[in-house]
Image: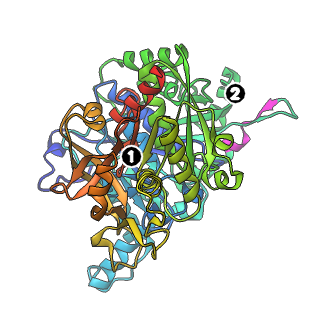
C-alpha cells in the first residue's frame, strides 16, 4: 500500500481496494456495463465505490470525435467530455464522476510531455516505463481520493488485451497490483462464442485471451464469460483448468432477454459480489437488491405500450444517443409502460417530401442534440409537424434551437431565420454563437460545458415538471437563443420558462396552449437513472400515456 500523503486521511484508517476490469477476444463485449453492474452490487452491500475508465486512444478526450466512431460524449458536472461508459456508471451507481473519472492515452502523454518540457524529470530519459506508467498509477490513486468515503475503486481498461495501445495501461496495473498484492483483483471479461455450423460452444478464444494476459504478467482472479446462453458446468470446468482460475470464479454473463438492468441481478445470482467481497476481504453487508427486483417486474409486466419517434442524424449508430434512449426507458419504467422507439434519419425527411408519411404514427417526438448542417431542415419540419398537429415534442440542445427557428419562420414569418452555425449570413440569426466563443478556433473543450444553474418561472410546464424554482443541468453547446428577438417570441406565444445568469440566457422554451412542446438548451438525459428518472423525461412520457 502507498504511504499516506497529507490530506489522505481515509488512507490512514482503511485501505482502498481496487478491481481492474480487462477485456479479451473482441471489443464491445460490455466492459462498461459490467463495471457498472459490479458497482451496483457493491453499493447494495453498503460499499462506497469510485469508477475510472482508462481509454487507450490518443485523443485528449472524445469531444471532437465523430459519434459514428465513438458514440455519444458524456458530460460531467465539472465540464469534462468523457467516454459514454461514464453514463453507465452514473445510471447504475452513485459513484462521484468528474474529469478524474476518465483518462485517455492522449491526456497521459500530454501530461508527461509537459512535465518533460518544464524540466520536471531533471534531464532524465523519459520512457514509457516508469514515466508513463507512473502517470497512469497516479490517475488511479486520484480517483480513490475524490471522496474520503471511497472503499473500492473499479478501474475499467478500454480496448482488448493484446492491443499495442493498451500495453502501457496493462503494465501500469501489473505494477499497481504488485505494489498492493492484498488490495487488488483482476476481472477478465472474455467471449465464449457458439459456432452454429459446428453446434458447439468454443472456449479456445478465452484460453488464448487469458494466455496473452498472463504473458503481460497479470493473472486473472475471476473470468466473466460473455455468451449467448448460460455455460454448462463442464465448460466452466474446462475454462477453469486451462486458465488456472477456480471453477467458482468462472461466471457466465449471458445476453439478457429483457433489459440491461437485469445484469446486476443475474451476476448476483451467480455469486459474483460474494466472490469479490471474499477475495478483497471487504466488510460488506448482505446485498439488498429489492428495488432493482421491483423495477425488473415493472419492465416484465407493462400495462401499455407507447411509441416515441427520435429524429436525429446519427440514428444508424446505436450508441450515439445512448443516454437519451436510457432516459426515455427510465421514464417508461416509472409510468409502468413498455417503450417502443422508432428511429428517423432527419435528412431523409426532406427527401421524402411528406412529413406525415416520413415520421407519422408516433405518440410523441424527441429531437436530440447534435452539430452541423446535415439533417437540419428535417428536424425543423419535425418541430413544425408537432406544433401544428398538437403532438408532444421534446427538444434537447439542438432540438430546442430547431424549435426556435421553426417558430420564427412559421409563426413570426421571419422566413430567413436560422442558426449562424448552419447559415452564418442569415438576416435573422435567432440562434447565434455564445459571446465567449467568438474568436476561438480550436474545437476541443471550447464549448459551454458542465453544470450551470437555471431559474424556472412559476406556473410553467418546466416549473411543474421539476417542482422547484432553481435547478442545475449539464451543458454542451456553442450557440444560444438571440435575446434580441425575445419580446417578439413572447408576444407570439413562446414562453421562456428557464433562464441562466440573471435571466440573460434562455435555457428552456415552451409553447403556450400546446399539450407538451418544450425545448431545453442543456442535456437532461445525462442525469437520469432507472430508479430516479429525470423530471422532464418522466413528465413527457406521462403525457403520452395519458393522451
Residue 235's disc is 2
The answer to whether the residues at label 1 and label 2 have Cβ atoms under 8 Å apart is: no
Percent x, y for residue 27? 61, 49
Report the front residue among 98 and 240: 98
Percent x, y for residue 472? 24, 45
Quadrant for residue 500, please give it.
bottom left
Residue at 67%, 42% (x, y): give it.
Answer: 207
Where disc 2 sits, the SS reads: helix
Residue at 58%, 32% (x, y): give it.
Answer: 362
Q: Which residue is mark 1?
A: 519
Which is more foreground, mark 1 or mark 2? 1
Report the front residue among 282 and 415: 415
Report the front residue among 377 and 416: 416
Report the Cα–Cα distance between label 1 and label 2: 53 Å
Does label 1 or label 2 sit earlier along the sequence?
2
Quadrant for residue 449, please give it.
bottom left
Residue 204, magenta (yes or no): yes
Quadrant for residue 512, please give it.
top left
Tell whether 307 sits left or right of 21: right
Q: Which residues are magenta?
A: 200-207
Percent x, y for residue 506? 28, 54
Tell me if I can see residue 385 in this picture. yes
Within 10 angstroms of label 1, few (less than 14), some, or many (20 or more) residues? many
Residue at 38%, 74% (x, y): give it.
Answer: 110
Tell whether 453 sits left or right of 334: left
Tell me if I can see residue 220 in this picture. no
Name above or below for residue 175 compared with residue 18. Answer: below
Looking at this view, name the residue that lies furthest to the right: 197
Name above or below for residue 482 compared with residue 27. Answer: below
Name above or below for residue 80 compared with residue 444. Answer: above
Where disc 1 sits, the SS reads: strand
Residue 78, magenta (yes or no): no
Amino acid at each position: 500500500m502507498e504511504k499516506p500523503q497529507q490530506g489522505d486521511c481515509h488512507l490512514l484508517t482503511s485501505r482502498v481496494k481496487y478491481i481492474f476490469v480487462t477485456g479479451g477476444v473482441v471489443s464491445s463485449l460490455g466492459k462498461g456495463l459490467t463495471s457498472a453492474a459490479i458497482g451496483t452490487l457493491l453499493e447494495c452491500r453498503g460499499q462506497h465505490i469510485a469508477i475510472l475508465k482508462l481509454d487507450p486512444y490518443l485523443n485528449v478526450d472524445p469531444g471532437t470525435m465523430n459519434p459514428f466512431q465513438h458514440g455519444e460524449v458524456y458530460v460531467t458536472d465539472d465540464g469534462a467530455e468523457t467516454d459514454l461508459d461514464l453514463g453507465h456508471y452514473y445510471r447504475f451507481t452513485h459513484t462521484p464522476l468528474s474529469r478524474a473519472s476518465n483518462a485517455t492515452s492522449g491526456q497521459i502523454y500530454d501530461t508527461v510531455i509537459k512535465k518533460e518540457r518544464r524540466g520536471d524529470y531533471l534531464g532524465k530519459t523519459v520512457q514509457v516505463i516508469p514515466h508513463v506508467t507512473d502517470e497512469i498509477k497516479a490517475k488511479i490513486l486520484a480517483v480513490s481520493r475524490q471522496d474520503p468515503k471511497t472503499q473500492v475503486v473499479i478501474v475499467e481498461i478500454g480496448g482488448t488485451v493484446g492491443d499495442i495501445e493498451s500495453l502501457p495501461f496493462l503494465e501500469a496495473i501489473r505494477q499497481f497490483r504488485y505494489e498492493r498484492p492484498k488490495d487488488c483483483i483482476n476481472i477478465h471479461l472474455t467471449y465464449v462464442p457458439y459456432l452454429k455450423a459446428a453446434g458447439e460452444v468454443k472456449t479456445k478464444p478465452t484460453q488464448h485471451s487469458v494466455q496473452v494476459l498472463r504473458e503481460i504478467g497479470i493473472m486473472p482472479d475471476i473470468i466473466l464469460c460473455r455468451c449467448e446462453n448460460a455455460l454448462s458446468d463442464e465448460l466452466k470446468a474446462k475454462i477453469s483448468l486451462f486458465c488456472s482460475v477456480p471453477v467458482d470464479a468462472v461466471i457466465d454473463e449471458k445476453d439478457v432477454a429483457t433489459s440491461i438492468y437485469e445484469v446486476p441481478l443475474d451476476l448476483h445470482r451467480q455469486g459474483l459480489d460474494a466472490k469479490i467481497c471474499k477475495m478483497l476481504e471487504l466488510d460488506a453487508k448482505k446485498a439488498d437488491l429489492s428495488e432493482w427486483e421491483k423495477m425488473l417486474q415493472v419492465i416484465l409486466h407493462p400495462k401499455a405500450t407507447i411509441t416515441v419517434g427520435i429524429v436525429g442524424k446519427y440514428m444508424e449508430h446505436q450508441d450515439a444517443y445512448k443516454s437519451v434512449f436510457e432516459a426515455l426507458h427510465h421514464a417508461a419504467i416509472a409510468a409502468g409502460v413498455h417503450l417502443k422507439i422508432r428511429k428517423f434519419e432527419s435528412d431523409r425527411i426532406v427527401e421524402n417530401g411528406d412529413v406525415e408519411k416520413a415520421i407519422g404514427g408516433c405518440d410523441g417526438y424527441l429531437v436530440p442534440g447534435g452539430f452541423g448542417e446535415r439533417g437540419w431542415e428535417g428536424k425543423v419540419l419535425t418541430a413544425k409537424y408537432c406544433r401544428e398537429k398538437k403532438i408532444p415534442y421534446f427538444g434537447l440542445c439542438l432540438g430546442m434551437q430547431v424549435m426556435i427557428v421553426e417558430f420564427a419562420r412559421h409563426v413570426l414569418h421571419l422566413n430567413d431565420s436560422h442558426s449562424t452555425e448552419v447559415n452564418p449570413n442569415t438576416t435573422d440569426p435567432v440562434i447565434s454563437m455564445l459571446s465567449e466563443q467568438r474568436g476561438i478556433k480550436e474545437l476541443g473543450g471550447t464549448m459551454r460545458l458542465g453544470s450551470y444553474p437555471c431559474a424556472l418561472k412559476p406556473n410553467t410546464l418546466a416549473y411543474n415538471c421539476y417542482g422547484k424554482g432553481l435547478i442545475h443541468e449539464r451543458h454542451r453547446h456553442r450557440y444560444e437563443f438571440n435575446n434580441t428577438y425575445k419580446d417578439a417570441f413572447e408576444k407570439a406565444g413562446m414562453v421562456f420558462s428557464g433562464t441562466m445568469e440573471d435571466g440573460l440566457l434562455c435555457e428552456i422554451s415552451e409553447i403556450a396552449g400546446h399539450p407538451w412542446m418544450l425545448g431545453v438548451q442543456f442535456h437532461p438525459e445525462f442525469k437520469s437513472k432507472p430508479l430516479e428518472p429525470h423530471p422532464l423525461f418522466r413528465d413527457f412520457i406521462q403525457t403520452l400515456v395519458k393522451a
